[in-house]
Amino acid sequence: MIKAVRSFNRAVTQRVGALNEHYLGRSRPLGEARVLWEIGERGCDVRLLRARLDLDSGYLSRLLRSLEGAGLTALTPSDDDRRVRNVRLTKRGGAELAMLDQRSDALAKSMLSTLAPAQQERLVTAMAEVDRLLTASAVEISQVDPDQSDARLCLSAYYAELDRRFPAGFDAATGDSLEPGEMRPPAGLLLVATLGKTAVGCGVLRFHSEGWAEIKRLWVDGSVRGLGLGRRLLGELETPGCATREPHGSPGHEQVAS
């Protein structure tokens, strides 16, 4: 299976021209082109751009300097917070993005043009499935402290969804509440699933003195449903070694689960 995955990776990178320093016949590699696509016509917060692309800050800075030096982008402080930098496309950058879109469309058409209609459908369907499975494979699950930011976000989203689903709404204060201490060893534990830097799911295991445990607060964000994440979280919580995990993050420390 590993051999097949590596073969697929080589075939894709070669077919899309990812190794070419002049991607799509332009004067820049794929990395810079990808940054232009992510900036888009509306511009982007540099921190958000780094999170979207999951790039090292130093590498992204080099890419942005190169694009700015070519007159394609401009960095400006945010109007709301002068410490935050926004990057936007210049007029020349907008024209370059339009050209990249045009040539990217042409590359996609070239992949389909030599195939019969039935083969085209198979290829597009297979690509969509690969996209979903690669997304699923990128989700990571870690034990975190309930006071960690991602944990709070997931638990809030869980309660908010119950409130939307129940005809009369849902009041967390009147339900089976869980105090933070009940989600920390030895009383319990909390798992959080992350995709990149975004929390997308959670589950709680609460231990009882009689020697049994119950699963609580199992939630998956709507954006990643259908990827099997709920089953994966449930499986992690049911794993005998789950209770021996080392938690990531602690009260007063903001840390993304990884």
Image (cartoon, grey):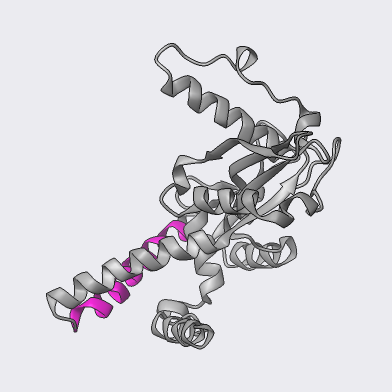
Hey, which residue is sitting farthest left in the picture? 117
Q: Nearer the viewer, residue 250 or 120?
A: 250
Question: Which residue is depicted at the point 80% across and 35% down?
Answer: 187
Query: Would you say the magenta stretch is mainly helix, strand or loop?
Result: helix
Where residue 17 sits, quadrant-wise, is: bottom left
Q: 180 above or below 150?
A: above
Along the horizontal axis of the image, is 206 left or right of 128?
A: right
Q: 156 above or below 112?
A: above
Magenta-colored stretch includes residue 97: yes
Question: Which residue is depicted at the point 42% across and 81% down?
Answer: 12
Highlighted range, magenta: 92-114
Q: Find residue 244 and report its horizontal and vertical position in percent.
A: 80, 53
Q: Nearer the viewer, residue 176 or 21?
A: 176
Along the horizontal axis of the image, is 157 left or right of 26?
A: right
Q: Find residue 81 and report its horizontal and vertical position in percent.
A: 71, 34
Q: 246 above or below 164?
A: below
Q: Is residue 242 visible?
A: yes
Magenta-colored stretch includes residue 226: no
Question: Which residue is depicted at the point 44% across and 56% down?
Answer: 94
Along the horizontal axis of the image, is 169 left or right of 153?
A: left
